[in-house]
């Protein structure tokens, strides 16, 4: 019996985990029209994975870490739901049902983007209560903070019904509603925002390249972000420091003395008002989903940045464009409303922000 259990465990280890899809590939998904369509996930290392959608089938082999990506051909808009089939060799296929093709937009920012239909003025609530919006589907990314870039995020696609949009972004909803009515094709709005957040934790480090005013921040972030050579150099030094500490701590304890504290690991500050956490947990799992562009409503938490906020928006746009493989994708934004933000009426913070935007 013991030998049988060991053999079973070895077989499971060799096979790897079950096929896992990236978070946006769920029933009711909207795919971007007229652009190549990346489909990705995880499987057993070296396993053959195939993806079928419509008349097209493409295959690849999972890398050593189990990740795989297949790019399907560009398709025209199509409101007829189809099935996306993903198969790992030797395993039952996974099916993503009712998949349509149209326009996909990512909505992000802080409280003004997060502001829900349920919290909006009566006239807007009345409009949303009139009935489902034909062709409009929404995806709400669950709030999360992570230090490092994640593969998975929580959320589901749903039709834009009076019930489903109650706690969805009002800006995202009305933006998608107008597109659906004017274009008469499927529209997908992915909402990923957090009230009170600064722009910095939404950055992808790739966007800071070439922005002179942010060069110091870029150097700091690269040295503490996995996947970059600068990070490995930083942690090599840290490992050496820990090794020295271990030697000294052992000697101290052997001599009946207290050991010095373990050196702190070099990390960026995580949080909605700090350096990292939001891109890593709430944007990176969506990369590189094909989309048309981004809508952005943020700035209150960076109100006193002055003119450098323009460079920060550029870093945001270029980082997301790089990660989503969409160099032409627009970043549409809303200028901050006239409001007294923490005493801003007593200085030029708000006019400066308007000018920068």
Image (cartoon, rainbow, N blue to C red):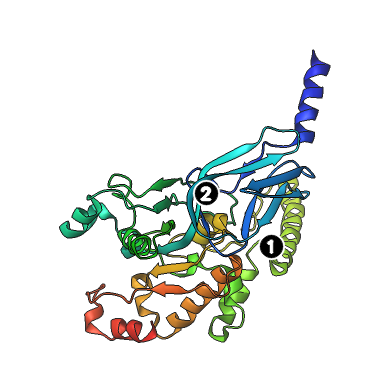
Locate the C terminus and report the quarter of the image it occupies.
bottom left
What numbered label is drawn on residue 278? none
Residue 192 visible? yes
Q: Where is 357 relative to 72, above or below? A: below
Which residue is farthest top? 1
**175, 46: nearer the viewer:** 175
State the image quarter where residue 264 is shown.
bottom right
Q: Where is 216 relative to 81, above or below? A: below
The residue indicated by pointer 2 is: 153
Tell me which numbered mark, 1 or 2, is placed earlier along the sequence: 2
Q: Where is 323 relative to 249, above or below? A: below
Percent x, y for residue 54? 61, 48
The residue indicated by pointer 1 is: 227
Residues packed near mark 2 inside 10 Å, few (<14), some (14 to 19) or many (20 plus) = many
Q: Are marks 1 and 2 in contact (CB under 8 Å)?
A: no
Percent x, y for residue 148? 59, 56
Alpha carbon separation for disc pair 1 and 2: 19 Å
Task: Describe the element under mark 2 as helix, strand or loop.
Answer: loop
Q: Where is 314 relative to 170, above or below? A: below
Position of 139 compared to 74: left or right?
left
| Number of disc labels | 2
Locate the N terminus and report the quarter of the image it occupies.
top right
């Amino acid at each position: 019996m013991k030998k049988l259990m060991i053999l079973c465990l070895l077989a499971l280890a060799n096979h790897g985990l079950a096929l896992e899809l990236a978070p946006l590939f769920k029933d009711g998904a909207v795919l971007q029209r007229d652009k190549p369509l990346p489909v990705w996930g995880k499987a057993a290392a070296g396993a053959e994975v195939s993806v079928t959608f419509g008349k097209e089938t493409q295959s690849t082999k999972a890398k050593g870490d189990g990740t795989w990506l297949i790019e399907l051909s560009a398709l025209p808009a199509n409101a007829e739901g189809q099935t996306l089939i993903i198969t790992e060799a030797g395993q039952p296929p996974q099916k993503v049902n009712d998949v349509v093709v149209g326009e996909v937009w990512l909505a992000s920012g802080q409280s003004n983007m997060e502001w829900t239909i349920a919290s909006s003025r009566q006239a807007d609530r009345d409009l949303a209560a009139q009935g489902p919006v034909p062709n409009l589907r929404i995806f709400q990314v669950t709030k999360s903070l992570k230090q490092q870039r994640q593969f998975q995020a929580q959320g589901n696609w749903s039709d834009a019904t009076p019930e489903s949009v109650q706690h969805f972004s009002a800006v995202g909803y009305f933006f998608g509603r107008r597109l659906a009515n004017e274009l008469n094709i499927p529209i997908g709005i992915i909402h990923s925002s957090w009230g009170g957040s600064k722009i910095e934790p939404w950055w992808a480090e790739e966007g800071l390249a070439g922005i002179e005013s942010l060069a110091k921040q870029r150097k700091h972030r690269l040295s503490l972000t996995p996947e970059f050579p600068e990070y490995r150099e930083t942690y090599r030094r840290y490992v050496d420091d820990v090794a020295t500490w271990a030697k000294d701590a052992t000697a101290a304890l052997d001599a009946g003395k207290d050991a010095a504290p373990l050196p702190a690991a070099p990390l960026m500050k995580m949080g909605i008002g700090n350096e990292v956490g939001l891109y890593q947990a709430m944007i990176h799992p969506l990369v590189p989903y094909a989309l048309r562009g981004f809508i952005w409503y943020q700035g209150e938490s960076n109100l006193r940045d002055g003119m450098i906020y323009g460079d920060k928006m550029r870093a945001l746009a270029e980082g997301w464009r790089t990660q989503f493989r969409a160099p032409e994708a627009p970043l549409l934004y809303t200028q901050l409303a006239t409001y007294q933000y923490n005493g801003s009426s007593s200085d030029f913070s708000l006019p400066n922000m308007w000018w920068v935007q």
